[in-house]
């Protein structure tokens, strides 16, 4: 499973570098939920308008007790008569990840989020955890256009304690692919 995910990521990265049009992503909703009030308190979990085409994500939660063993179950859903599982569904040891940065898909998100969150350190995590005004999003994976839901379940000691779920709309490419192909073959002839 892990290898398949990695091969997908590499293939898509290569495909993306090959086409180079800026894709468009807008977060449309954020829903956080504590599954254990004596461990996690959710104070704030909301999108704010950042610009006409952009929103920013803001999360403020408190881990009441230290979390020493954290896993992240990440599952991507795509809308098609309701949300259906799409492409990614995996669980990573989050404490190991922050030490080794050893998962290619989580690393994409980590690199975008680490500067605007309180998460950039190793386990344990305790007290206030925040993501502030997160809006700088680059997706090096060309997903097909559509409405998505990224489910993130946080497990402490192997039990679900918190969910942070983000809905977003993705538009793969602002140009129709046929005109892009025409254009690149024109370029090719010009070069030859
Ligand atoms: C809920 O949190 C408390 C406090 O940290 C912990 O002792 C308990 O095991 C947790 N319950 C579950 C089901 O994880
Ligand atoms: C986070 O939420 C708590 C509870 O609403 C609040 O007291 C605290 O000031 C917030 N922290 C920040 C930095 O926004
Ligand atoms: C985050 O900060 C580091 C070092 O401060 C910088 O090199 C990196 O480009 C920043 N990443 C983003 C996505 O802003
Ligand atoms: C994240 O933490 C690492 C290791 O402590 C540090 O080298 C790096 O500068 C930090 N980056 C940011 C953006 O805070």
Image (cartoon, grey):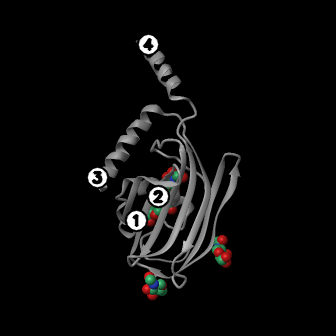
Taking depth in this image into account, of 84 and 10 the one nearest to the observer is: 84
Q: Residue at x 42, y 65 (%)?
A: 73
- The mark total stands at 4
Q: Quadrant of the N terminus?
A: bottom left
- What crowding class fits label 1: few (fewer than 14 Cα within 10 Å), some (14-19), or many (20 or more)? some
At mark 4, the secondary structure is: helix
Q: Is residue 1 left or right of residue 76?
A: left
Q: For the point 51% across and 55% down, which residue is it?
A: 83
Q: Is there a contact, CB below 8 Å, between mark 4 and mark 1?
A: no
In front: label 3 or label 4: 3
Q: Using the image as rendered, state which of residue 89 and residue 94 is in the foreground.
A: 89
Query: Which residue corresponds to mark 2?
Result: 110
The residue beneath circle 1 is 98
Residue at the spot of label 4: 189
The residue positioned 62% from the left and 58% from the top of the image is 29
Left or right, 3 with reference to 62: left
Tell me which numbered mark, 2 or 3, is placed earlier along the sequence: 3
From what the image shows, is residue 147 above or below residue 124? Answer: above
Measure the C-alpha gap from mark 4 to mark 1.
48 Å
Left/right of residue 36 with respect to residue 50 in the rendered view: left
Give the class, few, some or many, for how many residues have Cα within 10 Å of label 2's Cα (few <14, many ≥20).
Answer: some
Task: Please identify the residue farthest to the front as the structure is shown.
Answer: 81
Q: Which residue is mark 3?
A: 3
Vertical side of 67 occupied by 45: above or below: above
Mark 1–mark 2 contact, CB under 8 Å?
yes
Mark 3: give few (<14), some (14-19) or many (20+) Cα within 10 Å.
few
Of 107 and 92, nearer the camera is 92
What kind of element bears circle 2? helix
Q: Quadrant of the C terminus?
A: top left
Task: Point out the frontmost of discs 2 and 3.
Answer: 3
Residue 153 position, x and y percent, is 46, 68
């Amino acid at each position: 499973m892990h290898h398949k995910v990695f091969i997908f990521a590499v293939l898509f990265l290569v495909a993306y570098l090959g086409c180079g049009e800026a894709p468009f992503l807008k977060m449309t909703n954020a829903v956080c939920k504590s599954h254990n009030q004596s461990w996690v308190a959710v104070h704030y979990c909301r999108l704010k308008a950042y610009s006409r085409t952009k929103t920013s994500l803001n999360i403020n939660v408190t881990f009441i007790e230290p979390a020493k063993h954290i896993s992240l179950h990440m599952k991507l859903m795509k809308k098609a008569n309701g949300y259906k599982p799409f492409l990614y569904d995996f669980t990573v040891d989050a404490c190991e990840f922050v030490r080794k940065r050893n998962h290619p898909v989580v690393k994409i998100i980590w690199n975008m989020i680490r500067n605007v969150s309180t998460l950039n350190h190793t386990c344990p995590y305790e007290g206030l955890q925040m993501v502030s005004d997160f809006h700088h999003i680059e997706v090096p994976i060309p997903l097909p256009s559509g409405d998505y839901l990224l489910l993130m379940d946080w497990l402490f000691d192997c039990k679900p304690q918190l969910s942070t779920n983000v809905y977003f709309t993705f538009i793969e490419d602002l140009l129709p692919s046929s005109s892009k192909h025409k254009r690149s073959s024109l370029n090719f002839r010009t070069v030859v």
